[in-house]
Amino acid sequence: MTTICFVSYEIAPTTPGGCGVLLSNAAHVLLRQGHTVIFLLYMPEQQFNHFHQVDRLAWPHPENCRAYSVIELCADLAFSQADFSDNEFLWRAYCFHYAAQKVAALEQPDIIEFFDYCGVAHYALAAKLSQNAYPHSQLTIRLHTPLELMDRQEPTKSHTFDRYLAFALEHQALRLVETVLYPSPAYLNQAYRPFYEPWLGCQVYSKPPLINHPHPNHPITPGEPLVLFYGRLYNMKGVDLFVEAAVALLEMQPDTPLRFALVGYDSRQSPDGSPTYQVYLQKKIPPRFLSHFQFMGQLTWAQLEQLLPRVQLAVFPTYFESFSYAAHELYAAGVPLIVNHIPAFEDYLSGLERA
């Protein structure tokens, strides 16, 4: 059997985020097959402890799943962020490498899987090439959502030297890595390759696993029919477009019984300085239509399942995704979808109406 180490900022259900969902699903599959799964997590102590002491224990064969904290393993580091030109991206990449070396020595994983965001694998890969580090482990990067490609969807975002340095780390890590895992051919060829130089490592198709999804098996819930936005309240997810389209529909059909539900955690990255993205979106809605909108925040699956019998369709106007677990979960639950025509959906969600 194989030992796989996943490096991450996220892990479901402890934290929100699609990367954490992917790793949770992958861990379930691997643990059921008898493999050993290691997590190297960069997150606050309280979140790490909750995962390690509570959420992890509910997984299959938790005795074969162990977790290590980057922050704890770096407690004896002789350097600080100031020693890396006070650049957060360089500093965090080094912390990941410093912690990963300790985990590799303890666990000798066959595979250490990093993510592409901000090039966090850079120092680990450079050390393997120049210092024979990680002699027992193959280092891989999974294409998920790099900072550069996200920023390309937000042309108004200001770019500093530090931000361009993060882009450079992403490029360099991909150039050095042994194996690149990609979620679909369309995503690799259409979303990634036009913006990146050729990579030296092998490229392996690795569809993110979907092991569970909400089951709308409850009786029909009384109330107005819902159009659902399911995802983070964030510009790149197209939530502005969802609200603007809903308002346009209400202008044409003010007597419609439809209500618009927005389910997902708030990014708090509003473009106008509002304290939350919800406040920013509410400013786009004329007061006479506010009662048609329900901002429901992050829901548990049990709460979502109670809501689904009222959902007529779900809309995913997202501008960029690598896979979109939210869309796949609702698709598997039998909810009609309208999705934006982006590469992430092209190989999987066939026969759908595309916005």
Image: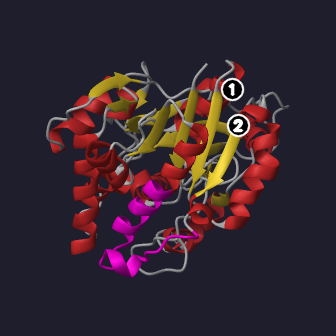
Mark 2 nearby-residue class (10 Å; few <14, some 14–19, many ≥20): many
In this figure, which residue is indicated by the disc labeled 1? Answer: 31
Please give the name of the residue rendered at 17% of the width and 44% of the height, measured from the top-left corner. 195
Coordinates of residue 89 in the picture (x, y in percent): 36, 66
Q: Quadrant of the C terminus?
A: top left
Mark 1 nearby-residue class (10 Å; few <14, some 14–19, many ≥20): some
Q: Is residue 158 left or right of residue 115?
A: left
Magenta residues span: 75-98
**Foreground of the two, 233 or 12:** 12
Residue 293 appears in the figure? yes
**Foreground of the two, 174 or 288:** 174
In the orientation shown, which residue stands out farthest toward the right?
Answer: 219
Amino acid under disc 2: Cys
Element class at badge 2: strand
Amino acid under disc 1: Leu
For the residues labelled 1 and 2, say whether their Cβ atoms are less than 8 Å apart.
yes
| Quadrant of the rendered image containing residue 290 | bottom right
